[in-house]
Image (cartoon, rainbow, N blue to C red):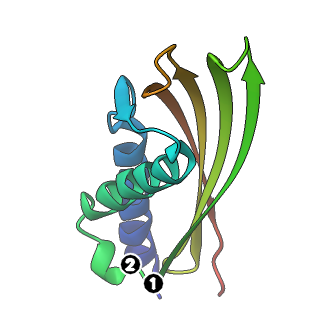
Amino acid sequence: MNNKTKNKETNKLINLIILISIIDLDHTHLFITHTYTLATRLYIALLCYLATLCTHTYTCMTMLSLYTHIHIYILYTHTYILNHIYTCIYTIYIYTYIYIYIYSHIHIHHTHTRIYTHLYTHTHIIIRSYI
């Protein structure tokens, strides 16, 4: 693989990171009940999937796996839940790994039916080249 091809593929990955970073993850309201954990996982997976589609390079990706580890802290007698969501996406694409870290604050209102989600996305890219 020559340098020109490598630079082109790297630029595609940078565009992917930019799109994932600027995609609107804030001010999201989830109207769910006791299945908030599953719904949150599905919501994040959907956002990541859409961000991938926006790059027009999704057909080149050979593997996209998603796993989520959730820690829940209950405060103020079940009226406020701080939810830490650690999401890593490993995309094997021209020997390149993209790591995405999503940090989420979930506030459950007194009705216990409305969840306000504020997501912060931090993306790290590691380019590994095998020459």
Alpha carbon of mark 1 to alpha carbon of mark 2: how far? 6 Å
User: As displayed, is residue 1 above or below residue 8?
Assistant: below
User: As displayed, is residue 13 above or below residue 116?
Assistant: below
- Which label was assigned to residue 43? none
**Residue 103 appears left or right of 115:** right
Q: How many marks?
A: 2
Q: Secondary structure at mark 1?
A: loop
Closest to the observer, 66 or 110? 110
Q: Quadrant of residue 23?
A: top left
- Which label was assigned to residue 5? 2
Circle 1 residues within 10 Å: few <14, some 14–19, many ≥20: few
Residue, disc 1: 2
Q: Position of residue 126 (x, y in %)?
A: 64, 61
Closest to the observer, 131 or 19? 19
Which residue is located at x 40 percent, y 71 percent? 9
Name which residue type carries label 2. Answer: Thr
Q: Quadrant of residue 52?
A: bottom left
Which residue is located at x 38 percent, y 34 percent? 30
Q: Position of residue 29 (x, y in %)?
A: 35, 28
Name which residue type carries label 1. Answer: Asn
Which residue is located at x 45 percent, y 74 percent? 6
**Residue 56 appears left or right of 71:** left
Closest to the observer, 66 or 72? 72
Which residue is located at x 53 percent, y 31 percent? 120
Closest to the observer, 89 or 95? 89
Circle 2 residues within 10 Å: few <14, some 14–19, many ≥20: few
Q: Which quadrant is the C terminus positioned in?
A: bottom right
Q: Position of residue 39 (x, y in %)?
A: 46, 49
Q: Position of residue 65 (x, y in %)?
A: 55, 73
Tag 1 near tag 2, CB within 8 Å: yes
User: As displayed, is residue 90 above or below residue 101?
Assistant: below
